[in-house]
Amino acid sequence: MSALHIKNSIAILFALFLAACSMQGMIETMTSEEDRAMAQQFVADIRSGNSDGLEAVVTPDLWKNSQADFEGAANLFPEQPGETNITSYSMNSDGLGDGARTEKVFTLVTTDDTHWTTTRFTTFQEGGDAMITQWSVEGSNEPPADLEVMENVGAVFMWVGITLLLILVGIVVLIVWLVRRSRRKDQGRAGIS
């Protein structure tokens, strides 16, 4: 395989790596499919007023104290179906295995491009299923700061990646040039002797 093929292969692999580098991609990598599905379903249950679904995933005390709030929260979502994305996720656990105490915090933004709704909730799990222990829903006619930060960080990742790719290509070109130059000098010396 020639140096050019190696250089092109490295550039293609690095470009594919950069394509995967986005805040949304990182969040999807950090969260399990089950967590993403649960978060999406929680938002869908609030929007649709599915009290059975909500009662099944929140703690009994939280359900008692906020059953009426769930009904009012449905009005804070866009009228159109729109799109819901996880914009923030964090996890804190005190160990591994079934008995570990695990807390996860999710932030999701739902938008139809004219109205934005931010849903935040915390889950707690110790042995059994994760249960929602806190939640909030806020509606706005402007994009939330979380969404803007996610987009800005994604742009920064892209430019840092492009810069690193250019530096890598420059290093490969320099190495190829030095090797060829060295070979030419060696061939020139061999012809003089």
Image (cartoon, rainbow, N blue to C red):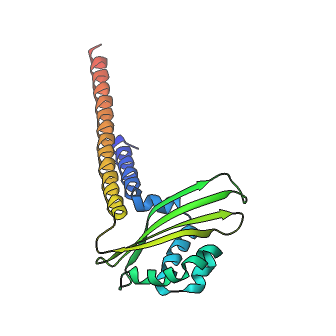
Q: 119 or 65: nearer the eye?
A: 65
On the rendered structure, is 133 left or right of 183? right
Placement of the N terminus among the 4 image quadrants: top left
Res 35 visible: yes
Q: Quadrant of the C terminus?
A: top left
* 76 or 86, nearer to the observer: 76
Residue 75 point in image, percent of width and height: 40, 84
Indicate the quadrant where residue 152 lies: bottom left
Displayed quadrant of residue 114: bottom left
Residue in the foreground of this view, choosing between 152 and 160? 152
Q: Residue at x 33, y 30 (%)?
A: 179
**Residue 59 in view, yes or no:** no
Relative image position of residue 169 (x, y in whole percent): 31, 42
The image shows residue 155, relative to residue 39, as above or below, that is: above
Identity of the residue furthest to the top in this view: 193
Query: How many discs mark residues in the rendered view?
Result: 0
Please say if 125 is above or below 42. above
Residue 138, horizontal then vertical, whole percent: 40, 73
Viewer-proximal residue, 129 or 159?
A: 129
The residue positioned 35% from the left and 44% from the top of the image is: 7
User: Residue at coordinates 33% horizontally, 62% vertically from top-left?
Assistant: 145
**Residue at the spot 49% in from the left edge and 60% down from the top edge:** 89
Q: Residue furthest front?
A: 65
